[in-house]
Amino acid sequence: MAYKKIETFIKELKYSPTLKELKFMLHRVRQSPLSMLGSIIIIFFALVAILAPYLAPPNPDWDVTAYPGKSPFILPRTGFVPEPQPPSPTHPFGLTSESFDIYYGCVWGTITAFRVGITVVAATLIIGLSIGLLAAYYGGIIDEILMRFTDVIIVFPGLILALAFALAIPDKFDIKLGDVLPICSVIFTIITVTQFISKRQISWKWILMENLTLVCILTSTLIYFGNFPNVGIASITMTKLDKVLAALILVGWPGYARVIRGEVLRIRNEDYVEAAKAAGCSDFRIMVRHILPNAIYPIVILASLDIGSIVLLAAALSFLRVGAEANFADWGQLVEKSRVYLGSGASFIRYWYIWVIPGAFIFVFSLGWNLLGDALRDILDPTLRRR
Amino acid sequence: MGLREYIIRRLILVIPIILGAILLVFLITQLFTPEQRAFLYLKNPEKTKPEDIEATILMYGLNRSAFEQFWNWLNQLIQGNLGMSRTYVERGPVMQVMLTRWPATIELALFIAPITILLGIFLGVKSAVHRDKLLDHATRLIAIGGYSLPSFWLGLVLISITVLFTSAIFGSAWNPFGRVSLANQHIIRNAQMFTRYTGMLTLDGILNGLLNGRPWGYQIAFDAFLHLILPVTVVSTINVGGLLRLTRSSMLEALTKGYIITAKAKGLKMSEVINRHARRNALIPVVTVAGMMVAGLMSGLVITETVFQFEGVGRWAAEAATGGERGAPDVASVVGFTFFTAFLFIFANLIVDILYAYIDPRIRLG
Amino acid sequence: MEQEILKIENEILRFYTYEGVVEALDGISIGIRPGEILGLVGETGCGKSVTSLSILRLVPAPGVIEGGKIVYNMNGKPVDLLKQDDDFLRIIRGKEIAMVFQEPRVYLNPVYSVEYQIGEVLLLHRRNELIEFALEEIKNAKEQKLSMEIQKLKEKIERLKLKGKSGEKIRELERKIEILKGKKLRKNFSEKIYEEMLKNPKSIKIRFLSKIPIANKFQKWLKKAVRREVVNILRAMQIADPERVAQMYPHELSGGMAQRVMIAMALSCSPKILICDEPTTNLDVTVQAQILELIKYLRQRYKSSILYITHDLGVIAELCDRVAVMYAGNVVELTDVMTLFKEPLHPYTIALLDSIPQPGKPFKSIPGVVPSLINPPKGCRFHTRCSYAMPICESIKPRFFEVKNNHFVACHLYGGSK
């Protein structure tokens, strides 16, 4: 049975319009030299990241600061010379003051860059996608409320809000029942009410949901005004890098939410969505199989461009000393080490390697993703396509 | 017809956003510990003793429930008390610090905004019209390269080049840091000689004119202008790209529309078709983005002011981030600054939306 | 045969795309006679739209016109439009030949008012006429103002006479009247500018002045003249309340209204030929009927020849004098409308007329699909679906020639081989 299905699937694939589109897209990618350049840059960095332990082997013996866990991301001190040293055969990119190896920092910083970029973009994408999709699909009051949230965050310039968040997020916080339950109550109430209004019938699913809502509300009230114990659910410790990531995610998701909301609003009025509804598809199925595939293109473009800008943003935060912990392998932090020399013309030119090289890494990394994203934009945008 | 109603509607919509922003900032402050928050209200941060901190906490109810704190904080806000700044760069009430340092940032923004917008739109239109030709590829490279650059890096590179260049040609290096050279700074600090009209040195210099019979005013204006060139170049280079690409794609889309064929069929010249018909439609989304970009300049200026050692609001915020005791954040300053930029953004958004409705008559109905 | 006002001879048009070369027009020949309505009918994709665009050379890239002639009879002189440069074509567009498009609200610029868009054409092609109007308006306004002042002075004189005052004052006032009458002859600033515009259209001084905020107040007279003319044209299009409509924006107009505006724009400079590319396809049937009535009326009033493109045979029957039938980039039949419906010759036309649903009769459709124009069938392009196909049809393309009196066909059934 399944074999037959696979067989027909492969046969149909040959004539599939999707495959033709994919082929055309690849053709366009190969046509554009800039997009090839972008792809090459990204592949290069990926290789550096993968081969990092071999390119710059972490040597625990040099780790004098005895960092807990002896993470390879902490820059090794190769000596105690206070003055920065220019590039030499043993230290290809030079040493900063207090003798931290810049080459090591750049290599392992690649991993950090990928980690920051991919984590933040993936998280913002998922959150923004969900919220945007829900808001646009259900419309009405859900849309209003969710969009207020996004508007409030968008109102702040990105770097500045991220800065505030990164500073404010405490090192350790406990999630207690009393924090989670009120939020859950609100969300569940909204869902039950809108379901009731839109469907006007009471299914057993709805009754279940409604009971859950009541339990949440009841327990919240008991916790706050009664003596119900405020039990801790989880305890989260955040390293400085985690804080930065969280801050970037909090600041970044509204961008995706807005874009996808715009797209879904446009698609929601298309005829095929109405046809799917008439055929009896559930909301979830419509969202996933009909709306999402048509809305995905701008998101892909945005994600690719975003990795570039997230890395820039993270570097800016590191430059302001709001980054990872001290002496972490992070490009922005390496550049920050040159900050002391600002204001006195000669020094920072003499110690150029401290900021020129890591900065160049940031630039080229971001450039690669931006080139790719831009090429994707040209390829995927139907109005700009000329055949 | 619709424009006035639209403006009124828009103004009403602003209120919940302002409330939301206030709420968000407050929630951020809640994340800090009561001790950190106490510092917002201490008059003399250096001489505080632990008992003073305790007293402040009690006085401002910083360990009470969230709702009470919100009320207190709101009260303080309305009175204009945003706390005291503790960064080594500036001390004093946050409000006052902001007002003092604000003009320097505005000066930068006033130079950056027109250059970026006009250049971005001009090159964007040209790239769209000459699609896939040399100009298009060149601008694409500049644009993408531009917004891939870390602003601090570009700043440092340009500073190095300038210093090397000037020391090679003129023998001694020109110091690109700060708003004016050291010599002029003395003149400015001397309030009897130099009156501070707007706080913007280029303008003030010209307004001051002759001081003590010497053209020091003009000299200062010129010096300030020279010192502005590099930071303005940095921020413009980075931001021009986004606007350029947007104008280009918007223009390309407009050129596929039906009314372009109608315009050609009427007998208009190609240049007229592009400038009169395509461009106005293409600029509609661009205006929105340009407005937001101008407001977003604040972000860019934080870094740029730090690199170029400008005495503006951005650098103050940057220093405040880690400028408190033992590298802890100067909460009052950071919060105050965040707040302030939020309002700026809301305001800019408002202007942009109104401009949008003015240009595109279709919006006024909806 | 009368002299045709526009004749397309053997036009070949190709589109160079990623998927291949599209042979859009395969050597078509059509002629429009002065004062007639020629219908161009065919299925979607047969090439009727690009034919009309190619007359004014508006075919979008990657289309290239690669052969043939388009001869336009311009005031007695025949001109090959395909050989002219862009400057010449711009004189033709809008003034000699004008176009109306299918979806009016898409083809009108959404950010400009109706008055602006129609005014644009007027200023482009009838500028001097409008400047004369403007001068007239200025003169009228001046005369009005002067006569009002003279009137006031005369009243003053009357009052003085009644009071019986001496002749001294009266004579003073009478002298003033004389001075005012002399003023009439002097030209004010605006008039001088407009006269210069007439003499020297590209004057730099005028262009400069029109950019300065306060000095360019002189433009308001021209605007008034334009507005007056626009309202006149809109009224001629049978639009009610033309003053209000002139200030509206395209998105505020209904479909029928917008189409009238487009037609107004096209006819504003009294072109000799009006090309209508499916103007009523997207409109309700009732509105369609109104527009068709309007076109018929306008043909009489403006005496233009009309090329009317559609896929609706009913519209053809009602509106056109002669009809050309197109299929897959070729004109297959061209004759007057009565003959086409009564005695169609080409198998495609016959099949087309057969496929019109009739109550009581079973549906008849044409078997097969329209061929892709990237690799069109050899010989006659219809032969794959033709019920009368012969072996010769597969190899040799039939010639388009006059089979009967004023009845052109391209089919081997009637001897289409060379």
Image (cartoon, rainbow, N blue to C red):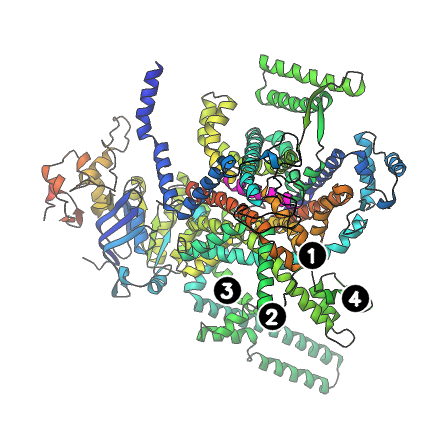
Which residue shows up at 47% across the image and 20% down it?
A280
Query: Real-space Cα distance between discs 3 and 4?
Result: 55 Å
The residue type indicated by label 2 comes to Phe
Quarter of the N terminus of chain A within the rendering: top left
- Secondary structure mostly seen in magenta is helix
| Chain to which the residue tagged by mark 3 belongs | C
Tag 4 residue: B195
For badge 4, the amino acid type reads Thr
Chain for numbered disc 4: B
Badge 4: residue crowd in 10 Å (few <14, some 14–19, many ≥20): some
User: Which mark is nearer the camera, 1 or 3?
Assistant: 1
Left or right for B116, reference B348: left
Q: CA separation, marks 1 and 3?
A: 57 Å
* Callout 2 secondary element: helix
Could you tell me if the residues under marks 3 and 4 are in contact, i.e. CB atoms within 8 Å?
Answer: no
- The amino acid on which the numbered mark 1 sits, given as a three-letter code, is Phe
Q: Is residue B256 left or right of residue A105?
A: left
User: Are the residues at dot 3 and dot 2 in contact (C-beta closer than 8 Å)?
Assistant: no
Q: Which residue is mark 1?
A: B310
Q: Which residue was labeled with disc 3? A: C225
Q: Residue A73 location, x and y as percent? A: 59, 36
Q: Is residue A316 magenta?
A: yes
The residue that mark 2 highlights is B170
- Compare residues A286 and A91 and report the one nearer the observer: A91
| x then y, percent, for residue C18 | 31, 44
